[in-house]
Amino acid sequence: MRLNILNPAIATLCLGVLLPAHSDAAGVEKADVEKSVAQAIQPVMEHYGVPGMAVGIVLNEQSYVFNYGVASKATGKPVNSDTLFEIGSVSKTFTATLASYAQVNGQLSLSDNASKYLPSLRGSSFDKVSLLHLGTHTPGGLPLQVPNEVTNDDQLMRYFQSWKPTYTPGTYRTYSNPSIGLLGVIVARSMKEDFVALMERKLFPALGLKSTWLNVPTAQMDHYAQGYTDTDAPIRMTSGLLAAEAYGVRTTAGDLLRFVEANMKMLELEAKWQRAITGTHTGYYRIGAMTQDLIWEQYSYPVALKDLLAGNSADVSLKANPAVKLDPPSPPRDDVLINKTGSTNGFSTYVAFVPARKIGVLLLANKRYPNDARVTLAQEILTRLTGPSS
């Protein structure tokens, strides 16, 4: 059951209480969850000047959505259950799910080289770059963004044709939109359909996501939150090369929470889709305390806050880090914390969940604020609701 609490009067709430991890008093739990979340959220919104946030919680087999502030400072419209947020790189987890589904269907193998599916790349460095490398940011040093001088599809393919790796594929992790973007292009090619159509007509409906879009319909634009930059200038994402594959999803807190539930096997899905989702939790490389799955990033649970902060830091997202291959790969586990951050110029997202305990938290905001603040806030909320993880 999902409960939507619209814009609680934060200033009137008393201190949140620490909840037992397995409370059976659902009614009491709802009120206590609301108090605990509100107390944690308020100072973060005030400190960073965040106009609006939506928080999703999974706890004790129940799910909650709490909405705070406004979707637009100009109109004063409050954040509600229909508000659409840009989720930035959390979009990559949907691309990974589609890639995993194509593998379950026998339409591709992650062990195949990228050039197998794109004839224009044959004879290039992608003869030695696997789809798995693309989905784990380990192809050898692809940049964070598509270069500015690359402005159309033909130029993009020429860029990939001429690209030379800095590192041997599979030895270093360099976080990259072109990496997962190229995987999305290949998935669409292997499934013989347009990528956006596959997402909006196949993946999203299969997961029961009714308010999730790559191209927001005109009829839904009134629900689209206004984003704000660090200097409070209004902004929304514009389309760009590989945007759909890498960072283009807009969704509600309720839909994203349902995706979290699917990742914890809490929904009744068609078997192939559940296998595909679970498959994205396979661990392939170790980078410090973090294990790189297919886009998702996981940590043994319980996990220290310092390790989560390190794994979500600029040193990991913006720099090359040695990657230790797990051979064989680590099968999907429940006793882990799985997480992912996402940002656009005007929005911030963070998702974290622990399958073994069926607990999770997601944070959506219509202003970009630092990753470390998101991670710390999420852990504070989880600690308030379930107690220390150790």
Image: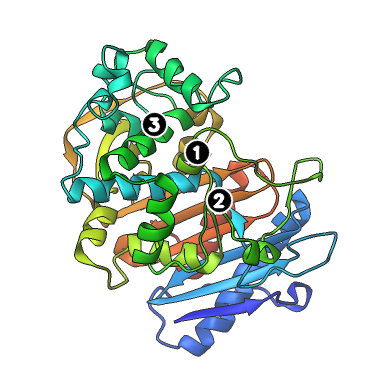
Total tally of numbered discs in the picture: 3
Q: Could you say which is closer to the camera, residue 158 or residue 338?
A: 158
Question: Which label is found at residue 98?
Answer: none
Numbered label attached to residue 182: 3
- Against 309, is 324 above or below? above
Reading the chain from its start, which is encountered first: label 3 or label 2?
2
- Which residue is labeled 2 in the image? 87
Quarter of the view holding residue 178: top left
Give whichever of 8, 275 is nearer the camera: 275
Residue at 51% over, 55% down: 379
Question: Does the rendering let one see residue 87?
Answer: yes
Whether 345 is drawn above or below 2: the answer is above
Give the CA distance from mark 3 to mark 2.
19 Å
Give coordinates of residue 48: x percent, y percent: 75, 49
Q: Quadrant of residue 159?
A: top left
Q: Circle 1 is placed at which residue position?
A: 312
- Which of discs 3 and 2 lies nearer the camera? The answer is 3
Q: Nearer the viewer, residue 310 or 262?
A: 262
Q: Amino acid at mark 3?
A: Leu
